[in-house]
Image (spheres, helix red, strand yellow):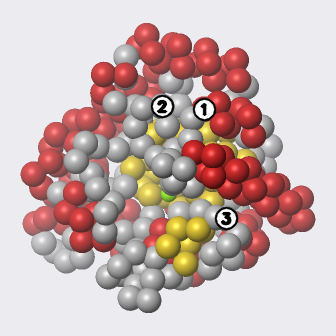
Amino acid sequence: MSKWPIGVFTSIDAGLGVKLEVAKELGIPTIQMHAPHRETRTAENATKFIAKLNELGITLTCVFGGFEGESYADIPTVEKTVGLVPKATRAGRLQEMKEISDFTKLLGCSVVGLHIGFVPHDTSSADYQEVVAVTRELCDHAKANGQAVHLETGQESADNLVQFIEDTKRNNLFINFDPANMILYGTGEPIDALKKVGRYVRSVHCKDATWSNEPGKSWGCEVPLGKGQVGMENYLKTLLEIGYTGPLTIEREIPQEPERQKSEIGHASQLLADLRAKLL
Ligand code: MG
């Protein structure tokens, strides 16, 4: 694969990404994909999906897990509902994430990603140790499928995320860095965070946002790439500094406005191609 191929986050029947056809129309060569619903995750569908990717000439680089009952309505709701952290759904979601890893293997893809949720901050608490334990179990399952597990950034500060990865002690646990999430959740200045976690970054999202006036309490605002406070040129320069030359996967989560979503992803793709030409 060439350095910094453009990518886009896609969905089949779950998640907020664009349809595969949009990637094709925009000439985007790689995708990450939100895992489809359980009933869609069959061997037969995997075979069909691989054929479609081949026909479109698109490479799948990561499958993201997501679960029924997750809500990103506001930050406190994310804390209660998202990922493997919420206790009531933890065991069921771990099982489902293993199934998503198995389906991802059928797709011939070696990376699964997820928002793990708000990891408890007290590292000596039983709850923290339990979250470490389920993450280990997921990593071990993925490893047997020849896969790495990438944690999406946003809900943790850079320091807390590094601590969590080091406590988990698994060599297939890495980071999908999303600079806009650091701003949206108010967990840190994204470029500083990227420098701190750089050695674990194995995939990235290209997304932009503006800070909330009460960071960490209410959402910042997701905006088109290049219009927010990430600073795209500085972001790409920093990716180069940490040695990251993998896919630049555009994420723009406004599926309620499909035409605008497509047009903004087209602009984002052009912006990234221009910066790539300048920096590489
Ligand atoms: Mg993201």
Residue at image location 16% in from the left, 74% down from the top: 124
Q: Nearer the viewer, residue 60 or 269?
A: 269
Residue occupying the point 67% across, 64% down: 225
Left or right: residue 116 compared with residue 224: left
Q: On the image, which quarter does residue 233 sit in?
A: bottom right
Instruction: Specify the amino acid type for callout 1.
Output: Leu
Work out whether residue 238 can be spotted.
no
Residue 47: image location, x then y, percent? 51, 13
Task: Tell me the element at label 2.
Answer: loop
Ranked by sequence position, the earlier of labels 3 and 1 is 1
Tell which residue pokes out farthest to the bottom in this image. Answer: 213
Q: Give me the C-alpha separation between circle 1 and circle 2.
A: 8 Å
Q: Position of residue 18 (x, y in %)?
A: 56, 41
Name the outermost residue toward the right: 278
Name the residue beneath numbered marker 3. 225
In-front residue for pair 179/194: 179
Asked if 146 appears above or below 72 in the picture, the reply is above
Residue beneath disc 2: 12
Of the image marks 1 and 2, the number of the one nearer the N terminus = 2
Query: Which quarter of the figure has residue 65?
Result: top left
- Determine crowd level at label 2: few under 14, some 14-19, many 20+ residues with C-alpha closer than 10 A: some
The residue singled out by tag 1 in the image is 20
Q: Is residue 41 visible?
A: yes
Q: Amino acid at mark 2?
A: Ile
Q: Amino acid at mark 3?
A: Leu
Marks 1 and 2 in Cβ contact (< 8 Å)? yes
Q: Is residue 264 left or right of residue 181?
A: right
